[in-house]
Each structure stands twice: as structure tokens, then as C-alpha cells.
Image (spheres, rainbow, N blue to C red):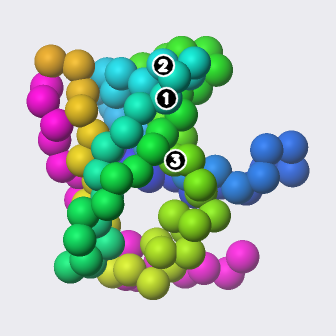
Amino acid sequence: MQMIVRKSPGQGVDVLLVVSSGQLMCPSYEGCAGTVRFDNGPAQRISFNGPADNSSDTIFVKGAKGFISKLKNAKHVVIEKTMYQAGAPQFEFDVGGLKWDH
């Protein structure tokens, strides 16, 4: 899984999670949920939106600005998300060295 933070003039700020294999199962019309843990903090429920084209390899974090503010202060992030016929794997991200120039 890749985590992408983007800022675009028309859409504002987004956090996308993209998988190279598997399906994230998150319909655009109802959304979905998972959990996130920043550093050694407690696991928290997180909501996602599916993309408008209903592709199954990408989801968008709801409340991207709040997520990014927590991300900026973290060194390690774990996201757990149910995937089609793959259970609920945990994806770990080392975010301590990211540069936040924007």
C-alpha cells in the first residue's frame, strides 16, 4: 500500500491509499472504515470514501486535514483495512523523515 498526500487547486487536500494488488472494497456511494494508529497511540476508527470511478485499488481518507495534522507529528503509522478475500491486513508507514514544506 502507498499513502499519497496531494494538494490540487480544484480538489483541495487529499490523502489517498493505493494498493498494487488486491481490492479495498469501498464503494463511492457508501464509503467504508478501518483503523489507524499513530506511533504508540490507541487504534482509532477512520472513515474512507471510494473513488468516483468505483475502482477498487484506491480509497480517500475522510477528514484529510485532521489526518495530515496527526501525520505531521508521527514517526510511525499503522493502517488496518479489510480487503476482498484477504482479511484485514495492517499496513505500516515510517513517516518520521517526511519533510512538510507546504
Residue at the location (59% across, 57% down)?
Answer: 64
As drawn, which residue projects farthest toward the right? 9
Position in image of residue 21 (x %, y %): 28, 26
Residue at the location (79% across, 44% down)?
Answer: 11
Residue at the location (24% across, 27% down)?
Answer: 83
Circles 2 and 1: CB atoms closer than 8 Å: yes
- Circle 2 is placed at which residue position? 27
24 over 18 or under it: above or below: above
- Circle 1 is placed at which residue position? 31
The local crowd at label 2, few if under 14, some if 14 to 19, many if 20 or more residues have their Cα within 10 Å, is some
65 over 26 or under it: above or below: below
Quadrant in which residue 76 is drawn: bottom left
- Whether residue 19 is in magenta: the answer is no
- Residue 57 in view here: no
Circles 3 and 2: CB atoms closer than 8 Å: no
91 over 44 or under it: above or below: above
Residue 8 located left or right of residue 27:
right
Circles 1 and 3: CB atoms closer than 8 Å: no
Marker disc for residue 61: 3
Position in image of residue 39 (x %, y %): 26, 77
Chief secondary structure of the magenta portion: loop
Report the magenta residues as a range.
86-102
